[in-house]
Amino acid sequence: MIPKKIRIKTTLCLGILLMFVNLSEVSAQTSKIEKPKNVILLIGDGMGLSQISAGLVYRGGDLNLARFKVVGFIQTHSADDFITDSAAGATAFSTGKKTSNGSIGVDSSGKTLETILEWSEKKGLSTGLIATAAITHATPASFIAHVRSRNMHYDIAKDFLKTDVDVVMGGGMAHFRNDSLKIDLLSGLVNKGYKIYDSTTSIESISASRFYAFSNMYHPPKMLDGRGDYLSKASIKAIEILSKNKNGFFVMIEGSQIDWGGHSNQTEYIATETADFDLAIGKVLDWAVNDKNTLVVVTADHETGGFALKGGSYENKTVEGGFVTNKHTGCLIPVFAYGPGSEQFSGIYDNTEIYHKIKSLLESR
Ligand code: MG
Ligand code: ZN
């Protein structure tokens, strides 16, 4: 039996202690904006809701995208057109500014805009770019180059040498070396300390900390023509190398050819490319779930084809598609986010916000 006096004291002390516990819980909650160490941005070029739906059917109803709990939508118009192209779309993601169609990393007047990749490099993060197209193609180019026209592949390739991007994987080796045009940017890359691989068949064995791995002289083949699991392997290799930096990393991974399936109005092309992109998303997500410090954002620059599902079967994994155009369309595009800061990505907002949200999360660490 505890004497009364002591019991009161004990109660008081407990009360004060509980008060402190409660206060610290509150302050922990209010100051708890989760900040990612690493950011992985995945862009499915031309991937609208119908493309995702086709991928879902093709995968028998099982998509890695379904593992994301935070979903939002973006408006995608460019500075000079209701319908964006991939250059203006990716420049909105990479710089936070609307620009004219065709412009890569510059505003409508041609002024250079710092990209999130360049900013990340400056802040000491490691960076990477991966695509299933030539690496000088509009989407990846917009994260590293600054040119008025997306068709200036040689000028875009030259801009790669002006950055310290660590890991680059994709097609387009011909834009870095062309003997008949006497272009040799590859030796420039070697002089900067990069290892160059002219194939991506043995990505797994790469151990260099800074490298370019070219799958093809121009574009990698489509899934239907046997590209295989290049995108998943490249994504995991990039993460493995980039995550060695204790300051964190930023990488952009593009499923480039979903768009080309839309342009060519080929349902199977769309479904197979979306399914491949989703497999890479799954690999990335597995890694991020384990890491706990990585924000994963999946979105698209625009929809392509005005694609719709007119029929199909989950059992037979078939889709009957219809198209209203062979160009891009202007509908809202979904955004999927996972990891620290992911809750910032819900709602409906402008495509430029992707940049601002990622940057402010990385900035506030
Ligand atoms: Mg693209
Ligand atoms: Zn396109």
Image: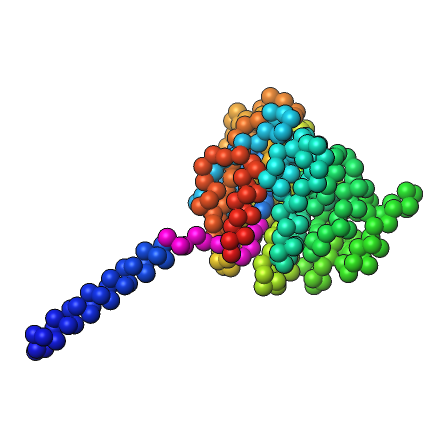
* Stretch of the chain drawn in magenta: 30-40
Taking the magenta stretch, the answer to whether it contains residue 38 is yes
Residue at the image position 86 percent from the left and 49 percent from the top: 184
Q: Residue at x 66, y 50 (%)?
A: 118
Query: Residue 38: which quarter of the image?
Result: bottom right
**Which is nearer the eye, 5 or 224?**
5
Across and down, in percent, residue 161 comes to 77, 51
Which residue is more in the foreground, 287 or 187?
187
- In the picture, measured across the screen, residue 77 lies left or right of residue 364, that is right
Q: Answer whether residue 308 is magenta in the image.
A: no
Overall secondary structure of the magenta section: loop
Image position, residue 122 (x, y; %): 65, 55
Residue positioned 85% across, 47% down in the render: 177
**Observer able to see residue 22:** yes
Q: Residue 54 is drawn in which quadrant?
A: top right
Q: Residue furthest top?
A: 324
Q: From the image, which quarter does the N terminus lie in?
A: bottom left
Residue drawn at x 7%, y 74% is 4
Residue 23 x, y percent position in the rendering: 29, 59
